[in-house]
Image (tube, rainbow, N blue to C red):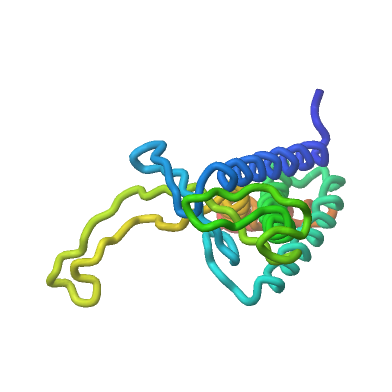
Amino acid sequence: MKLHRGAVALIIILVVVALDQWLKIWVKTHFYLGEHVDILPFFQLRFVENPGMAFGWELGSKLFLTIFRIIVVVLLSIYLYRLRRVTLAPMGYVVCVALIIAGAAGNIFDCVFYGEIFTDPYPPRVAHFVPWGDGYAPLFHGKVVDMLYFPLFAFQWPEWMPWVGGKVFSFFDPVFNLADAAISVGMIVLLLFYSRYVMVSSNADVEKIHARHDEKEKDDKEA
């Protein structure tokens, strides 16, 4: 049985959010802040928290970031709801939008609820659940849990080099989570393969896109 594109998008969102939250809660209640476990030579589970955007970046106040995330998810969800009827839009495009929504929603749970329901102890103690309101921060001010770390390679700059001499360079230092990964994959694939469909809202829009694409191919062949 072929699933409707709306059902596919909903399944992707639910699965990504569920896996993201399961891993975050497991790490938060089993690792102390800063603890890490080597899985492979180039892959660690490392428990860190950040108050900002994906990959630990920061932009504006915590409340602003949380509200911004919620607005983005609401707008994208409305768009995805309308997109489900655009039968000519590629399924891959729908999947990309669903991944972006799922990733943003996954981090929203941390920001909105984690401060209310978790403790934030000093290492080596680990966090645990507490009754609502007894957590480490008020509503909308929780910290995002990150744990995926891929230190692919590192080296030390020669001493004679200005500014960086003697310092250690590590490639890909950001620690991130499944929600960040879903956003990144969705955005990269969308930009590489489906950028021309961005904000398409009807089959007529898709037909116009294909018409322009066909005209361009025709002009290229004639050139």
Which residue is painted at 19% across and 67% down in the image? Answer: 166
Rendering coords of residue 192 (x, y %): 56, 53
Q: Residue furthest left?
A: 160
Would you say 45 lies left or right of 212 here?
A: left
Occupied quadrant, residue 37: top left
Quadrant of the rendering where the N terminus is positioned: top right
Residue 75: percent from the left, percent from the top? Answer: 80, 61
Q: Residue at x 41, y 42 (%)?
A: 43
**Residue occupying image coordinates x 85% and y 50%:** 81
25 or 178: nearer the viewer: 25
Q: Judge whether residue 160 can be spotted in this image.
A: yes
Q: Residue at x 81, y 54 (%)?
A: 77
Task: From this view, report whether residue 108 is shown above or below residue 96.
Answer: below
Q: Please state if 166 lies on the left or on the right of 27 as rendered.
A: left
Disc tally is 0
Rendered view: 176 above or below 163: above
Q: Position of residue 174 (x, y in %)?
A: 45, 57
Q: Toward the viewer: 116 or 145?
A: 116
Residue 100 visible in the snapshot: no
The answer to whether residue 174 is left or right of residue 171 is right
Q: Is residue 50 left or right of residue 76?
A: left
Q: Is residue 218 above or below residue 61?
A: above
Nearest the eye: 186 or 43: 43
Residue 145 on image: x %, y %: 58, 54
Of 211 and 35, nearer the camera is: 35
Query: In the rendered image, which quarter contains the C terminus?
Result: bottom right
